[in-house]
Structure formats: structure tokens, C-alpha cells
């Protein structure tokens, strides 16, 4: 329930504050005084979008703050889920900055506009003249019937399952598109895989072949070097090893005369042994270097395959080619597995379709069961509002296919005259008749939806006299279970209120601004007398106003 509203720098309002009590409150004022501006400000803290055009002073921010009584409306879960402080009251604040940015707060915690809107839907229901027009909309009519039938939980469940169905349909479509593309690519990837697989590469093979090719290509040069070196070391009469042997013999004789030669002899022995090892190693290498034209041809062929595939796949090593082969194998496996994934998703989709269809049928049955009782109760209220000959019927037909709301098309058929043909409400009802139907709908639903506050913005447009009084009575009855705030130009409705606010324009030093104040009993009588009078308020008018209030 709205307890307090503070508005700064909004439209024609520089600053105002009002405290609103429970029950039935009316807001009146001359045309253009700014009554609907206040409702617009309230809409902003309930999540409506705004821009800098709402700023009275474009150099300062607009601040709108509302204090709401929230205890007793099952909002604890909402506050807890969104990490918001919960208490008996909630303070909602909206700020519109000069640069066009907007900020929202719930109990001083910054929140998104969507979260603000979600909370606002649980606190206040605002109905303007435009909202009355939406009564002609099929979706609005279906929502009204669902509210009456208590279908909201089932609708939410259905919509969640329908959304899941849509996700599965999209997922299956993507899988099939992927499968079609994969099938087109399968032969190509299979060829690439087999080409690499048949090559039977081994890690390190390229380096080994390139080394062997160098040896084979330079085999004659290597043989020549080996021969001459081995001759120098060991095979000639004057070879290094022969000369070293002569030196060893001579030094051993001299060692008998000088002790230093003994150590030198030992070092020469080591060199002799090392030269022997080198000679044998050169001989072994000589045995392995064999010029083989067929081997060179084979190596060149093998390297040609490696170089060709490296160039084709833009790689630099056999290791990279083997990695490419593994990648192609994975792609081929994925193509095969796509069929299994598609089959699994098709099975999921069929099961989900059964769930959605069952919920849609259940939802449709509940709507059809509620249609006649709803029409009967609604008609009873409509007749109380000056349409005794009216008739209304709720028609439910099937749409071509399932949608997010089921497969029902709900149509309100109406005629205000006895025996008249029932036609769609949008095609036959006048503005005044639509207003009465809307008020009847809200009155009927107010007992079923636990909502703190209902706001009507001139829902009585086009009405007067006795009908207006009956509308006032209906709002008065609604206010027994919720807070009802009504902007009205009719004294018959204003007289039914528990509290009466007057919106007025006041001259400032530089311009004219809107303001609002709560009327005391005497001021209220005078204001209603003004609404009853064509010109000046007379004693007769004051008595008539007092009589209206006393009824």
C-alpha cells in the first residue's frame, strides 16, 4: 500500500509530498492542473521508462520516492531472492539524471529497472484511459479470464515449459544444420584423414631422412675423407700411430735417466689408445657409408610426401601433421555422433511437446470451466452500472497452433441492448461502456488478487449522474480490501472517498507549477460543490455536496 509519495523536479512539479492513507482516496482538480502528472511520477517508481524530457529543471536530477507498506503481501521471498532488506515498509526511489541516465533503488540498494518493474507489479495496478482501450485486446481478455480462474501459477508453469520447447526446437534446428554441413564435408575430411593415415608418419622421421639423404648425397666425399684420415692415423708406414710408437720407445729408454719422461710416456700411451679408438670408429663409419641410388630415390620420395603435405596443411613438422590427422579423426567421429545427438534431441522434443500439450489442454479446460461463471458475475456488476439490458458471453476458440499462452483465443462478446446481437467488445462498446466493463472486471478480480493498491486514472470518462454514483459505490467496496486511488472529475465519485486530494496550479515568481494537498472536511465540501456548480459555488451547491458526502 502506498503510504507516502515525494516528487522533485518532475514535469510541472518542482516539489511535492503527500501522505496517503488506506481505503478509498480521490484526486481532483481542474483540467490541466497536473492530476495525471502525479500518476506519471508514480509510474516511474514502478519501472516505467523515462528520459530527460520529464525534467522541469534540466540542470538538476528528478527524484521520485515512494514509501510502501509491504508486509502481509507474501513478498519476503522476492526480497530475499534479490538480496534486498525486508521490513514492514519498503522505500522505492527513482532518479533521472540530466544526462539521461536513470538509477533505481529499493531500500537504498541499487536495482535494475526490470527488478523495479517486477516489484511494482506486486504493489500497484494502474489503469488509465489507455488501459481501458486494451480491454479490446484478445491477450488482455485472456489474461483477465486467467486471473479470475486462478490460472496464473499454471500459466507460468506452461510458459516455462513452452520456452523449454522453443529452446529444444532451436537446438534441434542447429543440430540438423550442423549435420547437413557436416555431411557435405564428410567426404573431404575422410580423404584428408586417409591421406595422412596412409602416409604412416613417425615422429622424428623427417629429421632422420634428411640426415640420411645428406650422407647418401655426399657419400663419395665422405669416403675420400675417411680413407685419407685413416691412412694418416694408422695405415701408412709413416702414420701418426707408427710415429707415436717410435716416440714411446725412445722416451721409455730416456725415462731410465730422467723421472719426468715416465709421466710423458703415460700420457703418450693414453693418446695412442685414443687414436686407436678413433681409427676403429672411422672404420665403422666407413662400413656404414654405402652409396645406394635406390635408397636415395626412396628417401626423396618419402620427403616429397612430407613436404607436400606440410605445404598443403601449412605446417612445419611431422608432429603437426599427426596432430592434423587426429583433428580430422575427431571431426569424423563428431559427424557420426551428430546422428545420435539428433535422435536424442528429437526424443526430448517429442516428450516436451507432450508436456506442453497436456498443460495447454489442462489450461484450456480451466478457462472453459471459468468462462460462464465469470461472464455471469461480470454481467451482474455491469447491470449495476446502468446497463440493465446488457449481455456478455466469453467465447473460447482454438488458435491454429500452440503459442506462449496455450492454444485458446478468448473473446468477450457484448451488447448493451436487449436482444441485440453479441459482437466483439472492441467492435460494439462505446468508451463509457468500456469504462464500466473495465471497472466491473477490476472489482471482480480485486477479491481474487491480493494486490495492495489499485489506481484509476479517469476511468469514469464519459459518465455522469447516477452511473457515476454507482461506480463510486463499486470503488468504495473495492477499497474495503485494498487501497484505491482514483483521479476523477465527477463529484458523485469524489463524495464516496475516505480522503480527498486537490491538485492545483500555483503561481511562482517566474512561472506556474502543479501542487497537491489533502483537503479537510470543510474544504472537501466546497471542492465537491465546485464540481457540481457551473459557475460560482452557492449555498444550494454546498448543501448538495454535503448530501452527496453523507449518502
Image: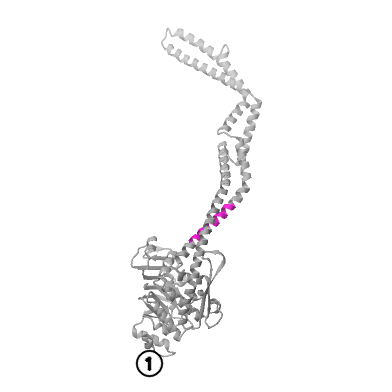
Q: Residue at x 57, y 21 (%)?
A: 285
How is the structure coloured here? one colour
Residue 192, percent from left and from top: 62, 41
Q: Nearer the viewer, residue 253 or 451?
A: 451
Residue 15, percent from left and from top: 38, 75
From where the camera sits, is residue 306 visible? no
Residue 416, percent from left and from top: 52, 82
Q: Nearer the viewer, residue 216 or 495?
A: 495
Q: Is residue 540 magenta?
A: no
Q: Nearer the viewer, residue 49 or 431?
A: 431
Find the magenta span and give its range.
160-177
**In the rendered view, would you say 242 is above or below 301?**
above
Tell me the quarter of the picture where residue 526 sits.
Answer: bottom left
Q: Nearer the viewer, residue 535 or 436?
A: 436
User: Where the C terminus falls, by quadrant?
Assistant: bottom left
User: Where the N terminus falls, by quadrant?
Assistant: bottom left
- Neighbours of disc 1 within 10 Å: few (<14), some (14-19), many (20+): few
Q: Is residue 176 magenta?
A: yes
Secondary structure beneath dot 1 equals helix
**In the rendered view, would you say 355 is above or below 540?**
above
Count of numbered circles in the view = 1
Left or right position of 212 against 371: right
- Residue on which the image places disc 1: 539
From where the camera sits, is residue 90 visible? yes
Residue 365, percent from left and from top: 50, 67
Amino acid at each position: 500500500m502506498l503510504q507516502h509519495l515525494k516528487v522533485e523536479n518532475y514535469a510541472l512539479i518542482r516539489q511535492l509530498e503527500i501522505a496517503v492513507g488506506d481505503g478509498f482516496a480521490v484526486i481532483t482538480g481542474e483540467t490541466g492542473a497536473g492530476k495525471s502528472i502525479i500518476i506519471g511520477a508514480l509510474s516511474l517508481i514502478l519501472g516505467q521508462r523515462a528520459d530527460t524530457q520529464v525534467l522541469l529543471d534540466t540542470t538538476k536530477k528528478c527524484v521520485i520516492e515512494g514509501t510502501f507498506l509491504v508486509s502481509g503481501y507474501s513478498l519476503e521471498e522476492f526480497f530475499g531472492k534479490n538480496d534486498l532488506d525486508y521490513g514492514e515498509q519498503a522505500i522505492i526511489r527513482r532518479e533521472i539524471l540530466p544526462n539521461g541516465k536513470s538509477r533505481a533503488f529499493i531500500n537504498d540498494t541499487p536495482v535494475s529497472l526490470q527488478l523495479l518493474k517486477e516489484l511494482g507489479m506486486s504493489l500497484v495496478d494502474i489503469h488509465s484511459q489507455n488501459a481501458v482501450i486494451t480491454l479490446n485486446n484478445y491477450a488482455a481478455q485472456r489474461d483477465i479470464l486467467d486471473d479470475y480462474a486462478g490460472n496464473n501459477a499454471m500459466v507460468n508453469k506452461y510458459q516455462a515449459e513452452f520456452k523449454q520447447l522453443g529452446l529444444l526446437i532451436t537446438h534441434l534446428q542447429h543440430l540438423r544444420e550442423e549435420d547437413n554441413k557436416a555431411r557435405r564435408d564428410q567426404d573431404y575430411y575422410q580423404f584428408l584423414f586417409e591421406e595422412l593415415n596412409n602416409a604412416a608418419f613417425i615422429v622424428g622421421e623427417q629429421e632422420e631422412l634428411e640426415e640420411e639423404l645428406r650422407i647418401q648425397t655426399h657419400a663419395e666425399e665422405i669416403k675420400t675423407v675417411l680413407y685419407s684420415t685413416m691412412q694418416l692415423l694408422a695405415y701408412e708406414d709413416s702414420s701418426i700411430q707408427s710415429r707415436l710408437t717410435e716416440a714411446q720407445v725412445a722416451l721409455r729408454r730416456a725415462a731410465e735417466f730422467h723421472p719426468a719422461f715416465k709421466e710423458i710416456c703415460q700420457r703418450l700411451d693414453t693418446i695412442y689408445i685414443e687414436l686407436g679408438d678413433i681409427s676403429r670408429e672411422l672404420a665403422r663409419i666407413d662400413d656404414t657409408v654405402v652409396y645406394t641410388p635406390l635408397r636415395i630415390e626412396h628417401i626423396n620420395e618419402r620427403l616429397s610426401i612430407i613436404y607436400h603435405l606440410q605445404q598443403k596443411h601449412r605446417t612445419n613438422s611431422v608432429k603437426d601433421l599427426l596432430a592434423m590427422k587426429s583433428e580430422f579423426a575427431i571431426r569424423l567421429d563428431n559427424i557420426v555422433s551428430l546422428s545420435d545427438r539428433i535422435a536424442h534431441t528429437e526424443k526430448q522434443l517429442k516428450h516436451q511437446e507432450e508436456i506442453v500439450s497436456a498443460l495447454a489442454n489442462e489450461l484450456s479446460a480451466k478457462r472453459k470451466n471459468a468462462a460462464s461463471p465469470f461472464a455471469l458475475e461480470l454481467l451482474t456488476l455491469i447491470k449495476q452500472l446502468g446497463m440493465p439490458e446488457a449481455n456478455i458471453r466469453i467465447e473460447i476458440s482454438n488458435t491454429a497452433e500452440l503459442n506462449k499462452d496455450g492454444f485458446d483465443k478468448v473473446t468477450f462478446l457484448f451488447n448493451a441492448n436487449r436482444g441485440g446481437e453479441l459482437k466483439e467488445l472492441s467492435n460494439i462498446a462505446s468508451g463509457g461502456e468500456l469504462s464500466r466493463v473495465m471497472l466491473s472486471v477490476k472489482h471482480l478480480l480485486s477479491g481474487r488478487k491480493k494486490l495492495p493498491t489499485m489506481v484509476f486514472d479517469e476511468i469514469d470518462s464519459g459518465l455522469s449522474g447516477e452511473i457515476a454514483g454507482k461506480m463510486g459505490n463499486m470503488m468504495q467496496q473495492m477499497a474495503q480490501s485494498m487501497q484505491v486511488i482514483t483521479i476523477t472529475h465527477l463529484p458523485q465519485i469524489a463524495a464516496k472517498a475516505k480522503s480527498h486530494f486537490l491538485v492545483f496550479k500555483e503561481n511562482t515568481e517566474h512561472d506556474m507549477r502543479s501542487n497537491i494537498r489533502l483537503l479537510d472536511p470543510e474544504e472537501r465540501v466546497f471542492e465537491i460543490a465546485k464540481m457540481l456548480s457551473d459557475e460560482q459555488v452557492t449555498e444550494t451547491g454546498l448543501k448538495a455536496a454535503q448530501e452527496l458526502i453523507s449518502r
